[in-house]
Image (spheres, rainbow, N blue to C red):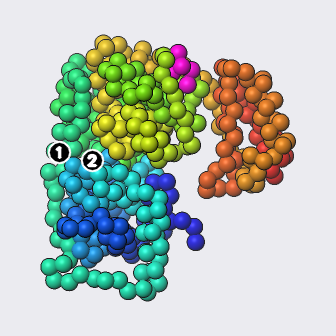
């Protein structure tokens, strides 16, 4: 059996891969593992549980709550809130555990269970491994100690979470958003309530789309993975710009007043300069992954900002930030982490800070984002090859070296084996899109020849 926990919790098709029994069992296992680790020592444990609006989240939430309470953990149900809100409330309320039910940007049939440790931080890998092992042992019949009487957990709704989280977002803002007209696309997801509320209270005039979740329409043709509706709305309403989130609102992408997309790399560029101006960009450093556009790296170099790059995945960005106490990091996909104010990517916070920079400077988002020129980027997936030999094939190394010589200082090559499929991803950046396509095509052929 493969590892249940991926880079962002346990995910799968709800009621097929991720069942009520699994959600309950994982919650019981998490309670036992944290108790054994001493997290609950000396006090009655508490967990914060939230979800996105997916229909399956209703029964999965019930299963998680039942599991935790049966293991002696008191539960605060915060209802439909973004993933970063659950992380924030876990820390703010001094809870021992946070649980979020969401599959983020995935389609509606999927769902997921994500655990947060005390303080709202992601669980360490070794704790996830231990939870999985305990879950498997219980699933195969090993008995577990069950509290009775007053020892069982109590469950109550915590409706104050909405207001607490919105208040937190507003307290972070360096200035108001008066005079801005902003379109918000909430993907019919977890931020459908809090994001419009926060932007409105901050002074912006807002137009909303994707704010009518019905349990079935999350991420359906809208949100950060489908920007066409946002682009049309920005142009149609003559807005200053638009903000798009995904289903659990840990991502933020934007669209400028001309309808052009502003991706995570450009957002990081704008925020990095803003933080440095306020002397809040610790060590003059921003963290991103190796998949960031070369234009981002060149822009940071020109601005005198140090760039640290990690493996692909926001978890690796966060690990690097926490280890060295960096303030800002993120991914091209729109995961942006502002570590002084969030323990995970927070799409609403990112959008608010981006808007605050526009309001503060009086410059358009298009002008601010132009600090970075996005170089043409071509990505080709090469299937049915031996991905394990990417780094050891001499023929492939020679092909890469030849491509790098051709591209020179204005281009880049990245070959990356997929973590889940038998394929290799070929990414090429160049000053010219035709050159990028040509080089990517030749490298894809080289991968097939060397690894096929």
| Left or right relative to 415: residue 170 | left
Q: Which residue is mark 1?
A: 164
Callout 2 touching callout 1 (CB < 8 Å)? yes
Q: Position of residue 404 (x, y in %)?
A: 75, 28
Q: Residue at x 31, y 25 (%)?
A: 355
Return the residue nearer the eye: 383 or 407: 407
349 magenta-colored: no
Magenta span dominant secondary structure: helix
Left or right relative to 32: residue 4 = right
- On screen, residue 47 above or below 413: below
Which mark is drawn over residue 250?
none
- Ranked by sequence position, the earlier of labels 2 and 1 is 2
Element carrying mark 1: helix
Label of residue 88 in the image: 2
Magenta residues?
297-302
Instruction: Please tell me whether mark 2 or mark 1 is closer to you in this view.
Output: 2
Q: Nearer the viewer, residue 215 or 355?
A: 355
Q: Residues within 10 Å of mark 2 (few under 14, many from 20)?
A: many
Sort mark 1 into few (<14), some (14-19) or many (20+) by Cα contacts within 10 Å.
some
């Amino acid at each position: 059996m493969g590892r249940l926990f991926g880079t962002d919790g346990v995910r799968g098709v709800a009621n097929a891969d991720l069942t009520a029994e699994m959600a309950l069992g994982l919650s019981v296992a998490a309670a036992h593992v944290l108790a054994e680790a001493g997290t609950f020592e000396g006090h009655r444990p508490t967990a914060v549980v939230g979800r996105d609006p997916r229909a399956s989240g209703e029964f999965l939430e019930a299963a998680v709550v039942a599991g935790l309470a049966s293991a002696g953990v008191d539960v605060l149900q915060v209802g439909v809130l973004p993933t970063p809100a659950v992380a924030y409330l876990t820390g703010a309320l001094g809870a021992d555990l946070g649980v979020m039910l969401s599959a983020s940007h995935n389609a509606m049939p999927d769902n997921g269970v994500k655990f947060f440790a005390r303080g709202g931080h992601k669980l360490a890998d070794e704790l996830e491994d231990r939870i999985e092992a305990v879950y498997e042992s219980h699933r195969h019949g090993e008995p577990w100690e069950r509290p009775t009487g007053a020892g069982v957990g109590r469950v109550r709704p915590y409706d104050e979470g909405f207001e607490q989280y919105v208040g937190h977002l507003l307290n972070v803002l360096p200035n108001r958003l008066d005079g801005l007209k902003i379109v918000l696309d909430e993907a019919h997801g977890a931020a459908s309530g809090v994001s419009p509320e926060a932007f409105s209270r901050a002074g912006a005039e807002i137009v909303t789309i994707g704010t009518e979740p019905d349990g079935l329409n999350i991420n359906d043709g809208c949100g950060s993975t489908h920007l066409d509706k946002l682009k049309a709305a920005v142009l149609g309403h003559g807005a200053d710009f638009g903000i798009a989130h995904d289903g659990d609102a840990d991502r933020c992408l934007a669209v400028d007043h001309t309808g052009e997309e502003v991706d995570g790399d450009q957002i990081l560029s704008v925020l990095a300069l803003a933080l440095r101006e306020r002397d809040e960009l610790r060590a003059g450093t921003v963290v991103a992954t190796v998949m960031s556009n070369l234009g981002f790296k060149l822009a940071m170099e020109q601005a005198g900002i140090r760039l640290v790059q990690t493996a692909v995945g926001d978890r690796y960005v966060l690990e690097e930030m926490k280890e060295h106490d960096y303030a800002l990091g993120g991914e091209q996909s729109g995961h942006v982490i502002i570590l002084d104010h969030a323990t995970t990517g927070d799409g609403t916070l990112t959008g608010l800070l981006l808007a605050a920079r526009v309001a503060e400077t009086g410059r358009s988002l298009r002008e601010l984002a132009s600090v970075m020129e996005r170089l043409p980027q071509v990505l080709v997936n090469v299937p049915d090859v031996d991905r394990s030999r990417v780094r050891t094939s001499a023929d492939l190394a020679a092909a890469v070296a030849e491509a790098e010589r051709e591209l020179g200082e204005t281009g880049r090559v990245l070959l990356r084996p997929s973590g889940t499929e038998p394929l290799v991803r070929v990414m090429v950046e160049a000053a010219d899109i035709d050159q990028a396509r040509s080089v990517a095509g030749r490298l894809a052929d080289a991968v097939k020849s060397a690894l096929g």
